[in-house]
Amino acid sequence: MEFFEHPLIKPQSIEKRAYQERLVKSALEKGNTLIVAPTALGKTVVAAVLAAYALEKGKKVLFLAPTKPLAMQHQKTLKKILNIPKSSIVLITGAKPAKHRYLAYKEAKVISATPQCIENDLKQKLLKLEEFGLCVFDEAHRAVGNYSYVFIANMLKQTSCLILALTASPGHERERIEEICKNLNIKNVEIVTLSDKDVKPYVSEIKLEWRRVDLPQEFKEIKKALMEFIRENASKLKECPLTKMPKQDYFNRAKLLKLQEKVSKLIEKNGKAQPELYTLAARIAALIKANHALLLIETQGPEALWAYLNRSYKKDRKSKAGSLFFKDKNIAKAAFFARELVERNEKHPKIKMLKQIIAEQLAQNPESRIIVFNHYRDSVALIEEELNKMPDVRAKRFVGQAKRQSKGMSQKEQAQVIKEFEANKINVLIATSVAEEGLDIPACDLVIFYEPVPSEIRHIQRRGRTARLRSGRVVILIARGTRDEAYYWAAKHKERKMISELKNMKERKKGAKQKTLTDYAGDWVG
């Protein structure tokens, strides 16, 4: 494999894989390339080999990642692979003063950086993109809207720099995929799946399981009260032509947020002339609160619901929406039952099931590493407390930096937890979405979704945390008759649609000769 025998690649630093060679060759021949491949298939290795070719031509390399820990990780990986002085591979983030960044840009050959910092420095003219022969956009699904990736890629259009975009999933909607490709000036798309012939020898089996639980009757009483509030307020909204939606849409957070945006725009234009718009806005906001409360009791339990209601009451009770929400008899009823369940120490049945699954795993393999994904910090704290009551379990939370309702973790604290997990000082990591994207968390034997996620991007990223070096399990906890079931099937449907869209778009461009970006405008750039 001549691509991997480049003099600027350290001997034995990477495993030679046929599909990676295929991807390198495709990018060199076809130009700006988007690679869509599951986590742990070595997308960074492809980027490193392409970096060697850029460096050989006397060009520099820019490697972009959305977070500082991820940028640090890429710097570390590139130092292991590239046969150039380690001092010439530098990390650039906002933590480094502008003067030092300017000197680093002049002297470095490879720059691993966060995009916001690069965007700011481009505006300040601290670096010149003409010096770069390769720019890598990791987690490329972020290249939408006003994200810094879009600005940087637009600046790169004026250069001959090769763009390599990497992601495990760009999303399932064709419009979103097209937006990403347009924003990054992509001319070629490569899709890698676990079923590809040249990939199969390098992947381990993932065993997918579902464990279902039933909600206790007390939970159902809370759910009934919240649903009654939603139905009553939806009926009042449906009387207004502006807010008329199908009945089921009032139980859909995404639809309610769109409706909220629509009414907010109308208030900006006609608020003074139509004061009733403020009442509509308040009712929509109250419905969004009720929907979130319903989701919490269904998927998390009374502790999470009670914590949310308490925070919301302190923050919003004096607002029009808060008053409408908290003065309602059904909300009062739901809050009363939730507090009663918390005082009785009643847990969501998922907790018992979670403990059972972890006990089974550790009985089979005491050296197992396990990740439990949960979206809510309140629940993460509860799960950490409950699991640490179990024998042989050493559990620790892993959350982002933002404070929100509870204390976050600094990047130093995150790095320490990952180090302890790798050394098996911790054998269960309870993580929010911060562990889904990119971070170099060691492979584990078992990944547990405490709740399904409707996003195919997050579903794919969570799943990719296991079966990296050996077979692994993914267990999804589902509460019957709740949105858990709908979210799981939504993610699966979106994933199938994403793969289908990508393959169809790639097929339409197969055999077409390379053209300029404007030539691709009418018929996707795949």
Image: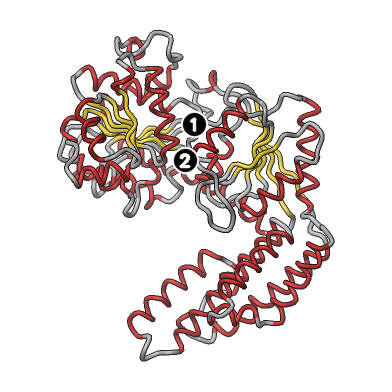
Q: Position of residue 342 (x, y in %)?
A: 78, 62
Q: Are marks 1 and 2 in contact (CB under 8 Å)?
A: yes
Residue located at (67% from left, 40% from top): 448
For the residue carrying disc 1, how many other residues have a C-alpha within 10 Å: few (<14), some (14-19), or many (20+)?
A: some
Q: Earlier in the sequence, mark 1 or mark 2?
A: 1
Circle 1: element type: loop
Q: Quadrant of residue 344?
A: bottom right
Where residue 104 appears, as percent x and y from the top left, is 25, 30
Amino acid type at circle 2 is Ile
Instruction: Quadrant for residue 236, please give it.
Output: bottom right
Q: Establish if 285 lies above or below 275.
A: above
Q: Identify the residue shown where x is 62% and y is 78%.
A: 325
- 73 vs 395, left or right, is left
- Dot 2, crowdedness within 10 Å: few (<14), some or many (≥20)? some
- 352 sits left or right of 177 in the view: right
> Compared to 193, does 173 lie above or below?
below
Closest to the observer, 295 or 105: 105
| Residue pointed to by mark 2 | 499
**For residue 44, which quarter of the picture?**
top left
Q: Residue at x 44, y 17 (%)?
A: 17
Up-down: is 416 above or below 54? below
Image quarter hosting the C terminus: top left
Q: Amino acid at mark 1?
A: Thr
- Quadrant location of the N terminus? top left
The reply, left or right, for residue 152 in relation to residue 381 is left
| 407 and 313: which is toward the camera | 407
Q: Secondary structure at mark 2?
A: helix
Q: CA distance from mark 1 to mark 2?
A: 9 Å
Q: From the viewer's perspective, tell me whether residue 515 is left or right of residue 72.
A: left
Residue 206 in percent (x, y) is at: 63, 30
Q: Which residue is mark 1?
A: 193
* Residue sitting nearer the eye, 6 or 99: 99
